[in-house]
Image (cartoon, coloured by chain):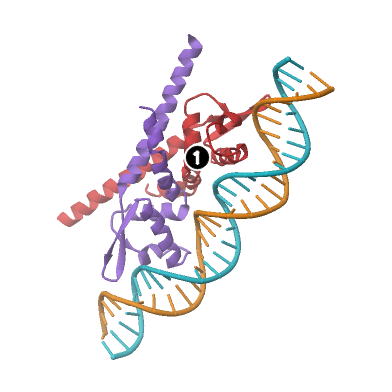
Chain colours: A red, B purple, C cyan, D orange
DNA sequence: TGAAAGTGCAACCTTTTTGTTGCTCAACAC
DNA sequence: GTGTTGAGCAACAAAAAGGTTGCACTTTCA
């Protein structure tokens, strides 16, 4: 059904929003390398403070994109690819909806 | 190259952000039906004012997701699927990067 | 011509976001 | 033990986001 898109809209918006920031996209890219990284490591090379990075990580965590495990004194963050895959699928549905809408409109004009 | 992801990050963030709002996702879904719609039409059925919807449309327009053409006294908005397709491709790359990273890590452990 | 429909623009307000500093606390290394 | 490293928490400030109201301005149509 088409309402598949509507049903999940509210669930997807926060994930989009979480990725709607260059800093967080960079964090996702770093974590996408595979190895879990600590907050201190993720702060390295940025112009921001550790606390700022922590807040960004909490946003990503809240969106389900990353999750963290405490290991000794360090807090390791790891990427969870599922929400990202879901977003990709959602955008794919939007694309397909668009394509079929165009096809319908075209055949309507031609009839 | 892997830096493909890095190069486009800054360009993608605003598009993600534009989709990071339920109201705007709904607007995209409506426009995804194919026919261009006026601001008044897009306001119908929402609990928001026309001006609020206008602001949301400007955000989408600024991100390149929609563009508008003036027709008489009405301002018609139409979806542009390209930025959305690009986002999908971007997420696809992130997924693939993740998969290959896991494969590398796995073969490292096994060696 | 005059009313109604569709917009645009500006001012304003409230809430959220993004970032900082300062302090505390636990874990590791020596 | 003592110092250092990694992190959490709270208060604060600036900026951006999301929304409203009010008014002016075209375009359409009777």
Judge from the rendering whether residue B99 lies leftward or rightward of residue C20; answer left or right. Answer: left
Q: Indicate whether A97 appears above or below A32.
A: below
Q: Indicate whether A47 appears above or below A9.
A: above
Where residue D12 sits: x, y (%)? 68, 53
Q: Is residue B105 visible?
A: yes
What residue sits right under mark 1 in the picture? A23
For residue D5, what is the image quadrant?
A: top right
SS category of the residue bearing label 1: helix
Say which residue appears at 52% left-offset and 23% top-offset. Answer: A35
Q: Nearer the viewer, residue C21 or A8?
A: C21
Say which residue appears at 49% left-offset and 46% top-offset. Answer: A17
Where residue B20 sits: x, y (%)? 46, 48
Q: Nearer the viewer, residue B84 or A106?
A: B84
Q: Which quadrant, please, contains the N terminus of chain B?
A: top left
Q: Indicate whether B59 appears above or below A95.
A: below
Where residue B53 sits: x, y (%)? 42, 62
Where residue B54 sits: x, y (%)? 40, 63
Q: Which of B14 and A16 is in front in this view?
A: B14
Query: In the orientation shown, which residue stands out farthest toward the top?
Result: B111
Mark 1 packing: few (<14 Cα in 10 Å), some, or many (20+)?
A: some
For residue B67, what is the image quadrant?
A: bottom left
């Amino acid at each position: 059904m088409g309402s598949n898109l509507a049903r999940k809209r509210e669930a997807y918006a926060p994930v989009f929003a979480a990725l709607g920031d260059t800093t967080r996209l960079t964090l996702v890219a770093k974590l996408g390398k595979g190895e879990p990284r600590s907050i201190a490591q993720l702060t390295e090379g940025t112009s921001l403070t550790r606390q700022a990075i922590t807040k960004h990580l909490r946003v990503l965590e809240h969106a389900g994109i990353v999750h963290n495990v405490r290991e000794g004194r360090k807090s390791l963050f790891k990427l969870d690819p599922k929400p990202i895959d879901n977003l990709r699928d959602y955008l794919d549905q939007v694309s397909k909806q668009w394509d079929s809408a165009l096809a319908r409109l075209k055949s309507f004009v031609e009839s």
